[in-house]
Image (tube, grey):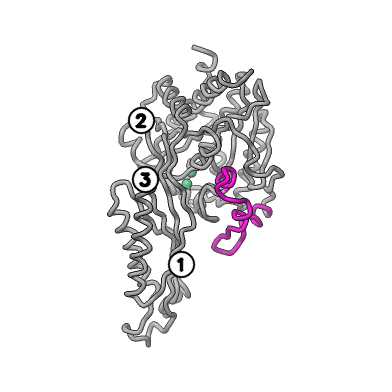
Amino acid sequence: MSLATNLAIDPARLWDTITETAKIGATPKGGVKRLTLTELDAEVRRWFIAACEEAGATVTIDDMGNIFARRPGRDNSLAPIAIGSHLDTQPTGGKFDGIIGVLSGLELLRTLKDSGYETTHPIEVIDWTNEEGSRFAPAMLSSGVFAGVFTKDWAYAREDRAGVRFGDALGEIGFVGAEPCGQHKLAAHFELHIEQGPILEAEGKIIGVVTGVQGMRWYEVTVSGNDSHAGSTPMTLRRDALLATARMIEVVHGIALEHAPHAVGTVGLIEARPNSRNVIPGETFFTVDFRHPDDSVLAVMEKKLKERLAAVADASAVTAEVTCIWNSPAVHFDADCVSAVRQAAEQGGFPHRDIISGAGHDSAYVAAVAPTTMVFVPCAGGVSHNETESAEPGDVAAGANVLLQAVLAMDAKLAEREPT
Ligand code: HGY
Ligand code: MN
Ligand code: MN
């Protein structure tokens, strides 16, 4: 066994970091609410930077607030091998989504420091800003700028539902870094994440060898009717935007079912105006999230959505404006990275299976600019984006060890190819 294969992370130390950071934004139901670019996000970022510096890393920040914690390698002229994910959460998020990906990176820095093991490539741990897209849509905004999918100006202009601009919020928490986002080259990118679905647990697998991410599209719909008195407006004269919206939500659900079993469709955010008990709602705003592994099916679902929402609007005497605000095509990960993960799982004796991610991740965008893949571990009941989200310490440790071995294997493989 080489020195590399003898290396292993410290499971208790990794779990302690999960427990410790979960206090930042802890909710009464045992979850974490740490919306992007809030003071809580800033607090966990400062914690992360201090911990990485203590582990011997030097930290840089780019102008999208992405944080890069770098451990030197033997040849620092080489681009780093990165371990990235996110520290922001959903409003009713859990302790693990994104967080174990960043903290497993910190654990790798600590393990390499303790062992004195020197990689050829520098190693970098990354906290990608605003992966969730809950406060500022779309999701994966900063890894998207890094990959050239969005411009920084477009990202800075994104507004939350209170009208706060992303760029202003980033400045507010003091994380506008000097480096232009995307200037940072990466030799490879790995991400450890909970599956956020039921497959691994149902099959008794500990490791998901992630081969790609399904396609995702987000829409915003504004329905316009007419505010009027709930008591004196005859039913036949109403232009009720919320009633029409209820019918439209059924349409979204129906389109997803028509493309089962792989399609999913969700209306997650809805606002009714004026939102008063005795006023017929004159306007609503709601969001649609469609996903499928095949982009051509998503195109069919989009066509049906636009046609059918228009038909409901006509029949309900309202108008509907449907805008696609995000289209993230299906992604296939790098074969060498995927096989490094699969071999690490085999070497570790962990039951594993290939899997396509149902959830979006920063890796989906980073894959456009660097060889990338992910490692999944199970979460209880496949539940995530929920305060009860939970994972087993042994599974998280297994995932972090597979991540470590895959990174070291990739370090050696890339070094063979690079001119010395
Ligand atoms: O939407 C997603 O899949 C991710 O949680 N941002
Ligand atoms: Mn995530
Ligand atoms: Mn998430």
Residue, far bottom:
232
Residue 40's x, y, as percent? 60, 50
Question: Badge 3: how crowded within 10 Å, few (<14), some, or many (20+)?
Answer: some
- Give the side of residue 402 with respect to residue 197, left or right: right
The amino acid type, in three-letter code, at marker 3 is Asp
Q: Earlier in the sequence, mark 2 or mark 1?
A: 1
Q: CA distance from mark 3 to mark 2?
A: 21 Å
Dot 2: element: strand
Question: Could you say which disc has been placed on residue 353 in the image?
Answer: 2
Residue that mark 3 sits on:
294
The magenta region covers: 142-171
Q: 47 or 219, which lies in front?
A: 219
The circle on residue 285 is: 1
Question: Residue visible at 33% across and 65% down?
Answer: 308
Q: Residue at x 34, y 41 (%)?
A: 198
Above or below residue 155? Residue 277 is below
What's the residue type where badge 1 is placed?
A: Phe
